[in-house]
Structure formats: C-alpha cells, structure tokens
Image (cartoon, rainbow, N blue to C red):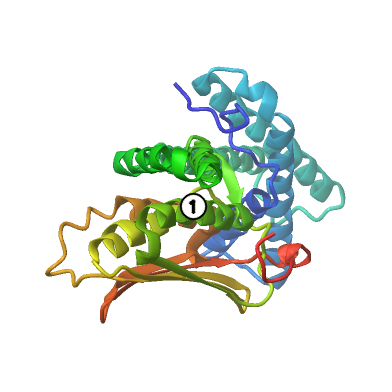
C-alpha cells in the first residue's frame, strides 16, 4: 500500500521547480547519451544536436505539465493502476507530439534525416514511457524517504519533549512546598515557571523561536537557582542583533542547560557558573553553553548522550547540512556549541540584542 505524501497524494509532485528542472535535465542527458553512443551511421553536428535537444526538452516539458495537472485524479487510483496510467499518459503525449513533428518535417521536405514514421513515433513513445517510469519511481522513493526522515525527527522530538527528568520534577515540587510558607511570592513564580516548562515539553512536534527557547531556558534556570542557591550562577552573553523570530525545533536549548546543571554544577560542591553565549556572525547563529565539570575519567556516569544526539539530528533536519553541533570536555569545562544558518529573508526580523 502506498504511503501518502504530507498532502495525502502518493504520486510525486512534479509541479515544483526542482522537479521540473530534473525532468528537463533527464531529457537533455538522454540526448547526450544518444550522441555519445558510437555508431558508424551516426552523423551528428551542432544543428542536429540543437534540434534533438529542443525536441527532447519540449517532450519533457509537456509530460511534466501533464502529470502535474493530473496528479490529483491519478492519486485517487490504486498505486499500480495510477502509476500505469501516468506512464500511458506520458507515452500518449510523446506519440502525439512525435507524430506532429514528423509530419511537419515531412511536409516541408526536411525529413530526410528522420527515421520512418512508425519507428520515430514508436521510439519516442517508448523512450518517454521508460524515462517517465524511472523518474516517477525515483521521486516516489525520495518522497517516501523524506517522509520517513520527517517522521523519525518528529518521534525524536516527541520523545525529548515528553521527557522531563523525574528527579527534577520531584525536587521542584518539594522546593515549592518548602517555599509556600516562607516566601509565597517566590513559590508562585516557581510554579508558573514550572508550568511553562511542562507546557513546552508537552507541545510535541511543534515549532519554536529563538526568543521562546531563551525564555524557556531562563525559566528552567530560575527554578534550578531556587534549588541550588548560590552554587548555580548564570552569565548570559547576547552579542549584537539576534534573530529572535528565527524558527527552531522546540526544546533545543533547555536540554543542554539541563545537562550542564545535572552533570556539571550539581556534582561540584562549590558549584559554578554556566556561560551562555548567543551571537550572529557571517549569517550564522551561534549558541554556546559552557560549564565547569568533573573530568570524564573521574565523573559518574554521564548518560548516553541521547538528548544531544536528538538535538543535533533535529537541527540537521530543520536547517540542513549547514547546521552544526559540537560538544566535549576540555580543561575542566564542558562546552556545547550550536551553529545554524540565519535565512537572508529573516534580516528584517532581526531585533536588538536583548530577549523580547
């Protein structure tokens, strides 16, 4: 059974410009292959190459437009029937177009170099049908693969967003209980921060912005500062104008800070300072988190790194190959750095270097 695309249609979408260019490129590649095939009777020149290229590109454009317009009705058919119908439609277009071309050349007395009518028309129809079947299969596999990647990314996001460490929840609730009599105002603020954190964690699969991620991180750190007191210190370094409206995967920054608190600050009797740096350089947003930490050979188990791996995977899915994530321990400090591209069309959304 066919897996539908996000729009519910299983037939590949040829209405997009990259797909159209791919179809035209396939047609031109076919002409080049025919040109390069050694044949004693072949007599290609620039004029013949240009004519063949124009003919092939015209056929490819016609077939692509037809399949683009017929995508919705064809997708209502069963997969095998619809695929066969798409190939038959492409062949029909090629047969009609080649018959017209052969007739035009013959009528002006310019068809001496063309094969016979049956061979020209039949060959054109067969080649177009074969290439259309190959192209549709390729695009179909690509669409299914992209759907699986998106589903995997959403599943990892759901798993990460649904995960709030139980010890953090219990410690926060115990801390709030002790604050209720001593400082009700602080306790109320902690409850509000905790509710915002869980509301974000339960918003599985949703998108966020840089401003939302920073705001959520500040709420998380304020809860941990109530629990750890002076042992936890945070220094924010917001350099220049930052793209606060930049779309980001939800819960990108908070899990990194959670690791910094859990595996770094909380294991040091004297605590330490978490440094958070945000800056944009050469069209790239860089988010850096650094904290003091025990050496890896003396520290307790650090975990399997699933949160960092999931964040790196989701950033790659959201921003492509330009997204980078580096992390590791060096000279008493553990540092994690995220780099994501800032779209050029987002320049108008960039505001001052403070959290909105």
Reply above or below: 236 against 67: below
Residue 311 point in image, percent of width and height: 42, 54
77 sits left or right of 47 in the view: left
329 sits left or right of 220 in the view: left
**Which residue is found at the position 50% from the left and 43% from the top?**
187
Front residue (pair 300, 207): 300
237 sits left or right of 233 in the view: right
Q: Quadrant location of residue 91?
A: top right
Q: Quadrant of the N terminus?
A: top left
Q: Quadrant location of residue 45?
A: bottom right
Residue 197 point in image, percent of width and height: 50, 43
Q: Quadrant of the C terminus?
A: bottom right
Determine the secondary structure under disc 1: helix
Front residue (pair 269, 251): 269
> Few, some or many C-alpha atoms within 10 Å of disc 1 (few <14, some 14-19, many ≥20)?
some
Front residue (pair 244, 152): 244
Residue 266 point in image, percent of width and height: 28, 60
Task: Decide if residue 20 is in sight here.
Answer: yes
**Which residue is found at the position 53% from the left and 37% from the top?**
199
Reply above or below: 97 against 76: below
Reply above or below: 201 against 78: below
Q: Quadrant location of residue 207?
A: top right
**Which residue is found at the position 68% from the left and 57% from the top?**
245
Front residue (pair 342, 61): 342
Residue furthest front in the image:
182
Reply above or below: 76 against 318: above
Task: Decide if residue 145 is in sight here.
Answer: no
Residue 208 point in image, percent of width and height: 59, 48
The residue pinned by badge 1 equals 317
Residue furthest left in the image:
298
């Amino acid at each position: 059974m066919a897996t539908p695309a996000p729009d519910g249609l299983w037939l590949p979408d040829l209405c997009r410009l990259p797909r159209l260019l791919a179809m035209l490129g396939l047609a031109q590649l076919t002409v080049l292959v025919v040109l390069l095939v050694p044949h004693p009777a072949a007599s290609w020149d620039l004029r013949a190459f240009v004519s063949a290229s124009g003919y092939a590109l015209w056929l490819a454009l016609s077939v692509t437009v037809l399949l683009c317009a017929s995508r919705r009705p064809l997708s209502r058919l069963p997969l095998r029937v619809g695929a066969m119908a798409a190939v038959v439609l492409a062949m029909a277009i090629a047969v009609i177009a080649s018959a017209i071309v052969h007739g035009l050349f013959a009528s002006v007395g310019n068809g001496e170099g063309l094969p016979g009518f049956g061979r020209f028309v039949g060959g054109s129809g067969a080649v177009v049908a074969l290439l259309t079947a190959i192209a549709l299969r390729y695009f179909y596999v690509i669409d299914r693969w992209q759907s699986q990647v998106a589903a995997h990314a959403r599943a990892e996001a759901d798993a990460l967003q649904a995960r709030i460490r139980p010890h953090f929840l219990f410690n926060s609730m115990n801390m709030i209980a002790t604050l209720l009599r001593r400082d009700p105002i602080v306790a109320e603020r902690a409850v509000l921060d905790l509710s915002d954190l869980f509301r974000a964690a339960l918003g599985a699969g949703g998108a966020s912005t840089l401003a939302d991620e920073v705001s959520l991180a500040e709420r998380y750190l304020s809860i941990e500062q109530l629990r750890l007191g002076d042992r936890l210190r945070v220094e924010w370094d917001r350099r220049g104008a930052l793209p606060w409206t930049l779309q980001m995967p939800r819960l990108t920054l908070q899990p990194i800070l959670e690791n910094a608190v859990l595996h770094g600050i909380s294991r040091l009797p004297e605590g330490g300072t978490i440094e958070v740096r945000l800056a944009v350089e050469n069209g790239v947003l860089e988010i850096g988190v650094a904290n003091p930490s025990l050496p890896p050979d003396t520290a307790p188990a650090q975990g399997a790194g699933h949160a960092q791996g999931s964040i790196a995977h989701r950033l790659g899915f959201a921003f492509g190959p330009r997204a980078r994530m580096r992390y590791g321990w060096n000279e008493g400090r553990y540092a994690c750095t995220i780099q994501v591209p800032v779209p050029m069309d987002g320049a108008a959304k960039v505001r001052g270097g403070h959290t909105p």
